Amino acid sequence: MWKKQQFDVVVVGGGPAGSTFARIAARGGLSVLVLEKDRDIGVPVRCGEAVSDAGLRIFHEPRDRWIKSTITRIKLVAPNESSVEFDMKEKGYILDRRIFDYDLADMAVEEGAIVITKAYVDGLLIDNDYAVGVKGTYLNEPFEVRAKLVVGADGVESRVGRWMGIRTQLKLKDMESAIQKTVSGIDVEPDRFEFYLSKKWAPGGYLWVFPKGRHMANIGLGISGNYAREGKAACRFLDEFLEWKYPQASVLTTVAGGVPVAKTLKQIVANGLMLVGDAARTVNPMTGGGIISAMRSGLLAAETAVELIKNRKDLHMKNLREYEHRWHKIGGRNHERYYRLKEAIFRFSDDDLNRIASRIAAVSVDDRSLLKLFSIAVAQKPTLLIDVVRLFARL
């Protein structure tokens, strides 16, 4: 029985970050327990479900059962409702996260991890300032599980880090209030991302239409916390957009929550503890997308954990910081560049956005790209132009 075992690692949270960590760590010979508070892995889906093909292939060959739409084009709609389109350099996908997350957890189990749902973790076991396990309830019964290492993969609302004294607070401007509805009975282009940019649609953020076939889409938006506090909730912005653009749509699901659009936490490890995914703030600050970056953090954390535990190294934070170093080398620097771009672009007025759209529209279709878009957007800020070039040189 898992409640009577001691593990090398206990992972709190069964999303892409937690499942990826569990798969890699179990493959490396560690005993791993994943505790997920919800009834099912992959539910609820609080995500636009978009990933890049290149990003997904870092970890897995794409499976047909994961993919609802293959995306090859982008459409940007300016405040004056003018629009520009261009082909993507590399294709992307809209996933079915219920199936995708379930399969990631199943892959971890195939490697030897144990996954338990309906297990609500409400505290850490701490000994001599080390995390040495977790406590909680499972089917209304209390439990305690001891482990050499605890991994917090418990999302944006993560408490695991706070229990060990890690400062996880966010500035209001770095937390978006987001809502998404999956709607059907509409007509959309199945191979195209659509983004609506305007303070009237999503102040301090953007609105998206991500197709899941020709007649279904995830339609959602995120608004900056600075605007959310002014009284008009994200749900009102979305309802107004749907009434204007898709008045006949049928709403199948609605999800809402906070999206951290901040830099990665300065500290993502403590004695006997690591944070991965949203808990570590690995979400792309510019787009709010976090699936691939969460999986990457899970991978890097697991590789570090395997090396330390297999070599009987002390899991003091000074050793666990190897994971921090790896993350900042691979993804952290780009996150900081995306953050600077976000800070600049989301301050643009609607007139600024209309001028940018007009300049992009003047570029020949064959020459349009995301690099060209960002270069035009930050043309008056030379330091940001350097960030743009460095970002796209790595993509």
Image (cartoon, rainbow, N blue to C red):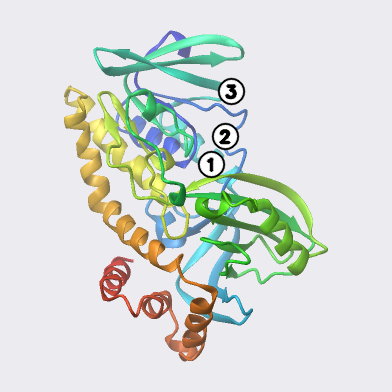
Please tell me in which quadrant of the rendered image residue 8 appears: top left
| Mark 1 vs mark 2, CA separation in Å | 6 Å
Q: Position of residue 353 (x, y in %)?
A: 51, 76
Out of 76 and 364, give the one closest to the viewer. 76
How crowded pointer 1 is (Cα within 10 Å; few <14, some 14-19, many 20+) is rated as many
Q: Is residue 51 above or below residue 170?
A: below
Q: Which residue is depicted at the point 63% across and 53% down?
A: 234
Q: Is residue 286 above or below residue 111?
A: below
The label shown at residue 41 is: 2
Label 1 SS: helix
- Nearer to us: label 3 or label 1: 3
- What amino acid type should be assigned to the residue bearing mark 3? Lys
Out of 317 and 89, give the one closest to the viewer. 317
- Asked whether the residues under the numbered discs 1 and 2 touch, taking CB atoms below 8 Å apart as contact, a structural biologist would say yes
- Asked whether the residues under the numbered discs 2 and 3 touch, taking CB atoms below 8 Å apart as contact, a structural biologist would say no
Q: Which residue is depicted at the point 45% across and 52% down?
A: 173
Q: Which residue is mark 3?
A: 118
Q: Which residue is mark 1?
A: 101
